[in-house]
Image: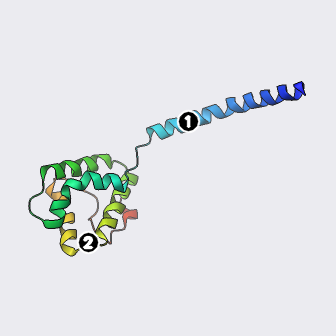
Amino acid sequence: MAATTGIMIKIALIAAVMVAPLITETAAAAAMAPPQISCGRVTSTLAPCFEYVLGGGSVPVNCCTGVKSLYKESSTTAARRNVCFCLKSVTSTASPAIIKNAKALPGKCGVFIPYEISPTIDCNKVK
């Protein structure tokens, strides 16, 4: 029985030595990957814009700060698509006036996004 236990321990150690580099590589890749942008993050970042989007008028400075911040965070195709899907979802039940204001928002804040905010946008085509 002691011999069997010794062999099992050796096998476990060999397996641990073989798996450790894989775990380290996976952890390193995860640490280097940019964080995904959730719809909650999009909503909270753009919260200062709600008054403008709902009623028009002038765009608050803190709204443009949020727009620019979200733009900078969206540095990958996946992040831009996540933001697109969130905006598409929000505009899917919005009135034409709200959609018009939402479409104008990036330009009013001096930001170019590679798609038009719309309930019909195909976010899978966003690069």
Q: Real-space Cα distance between discs 1 and 2?
A: 45 Å
Which residue lies at the image location 9% right of the left edge and 59% below the top edge? Answer: 58
Query: Which label sits on residue 78?
Result: none
Colour mode? rainbow
Do callouts 1 and 2 mark residues in contact (Cβ within 8 Å)? no
Which residue lies at the image location 26% right of the left edge and 51% below the top edge? Answer: 45
Callout 2, which amino acid?
A: Ala
What is the total number of numbered labels drawn onto the structure image? Answer: 2
The image position of residue 59, as x and y in percent, is: 12, 57
Callout 1, which amino acid?
A: Glu
Which residue lies at the image location 26% right of the left edge and 57% below the top edge? Answer: 113
The image position of residue 82, as x and y in percent, is: 38, 57
Task: Locate residue 113 relative to residue 4 in the image: left or right.
Answer: left
The image position of residue 64, as x and y in percent, is: 17, 51
| Secondary structure state at the residue bearing disc 1 | helix
Q: Which residue is mark 1?
A: 25
Q: Which residue is mark 2?
A: 94
Task: Locate residue 123 relative to residue 109 in the image: left or right.
Answer: right
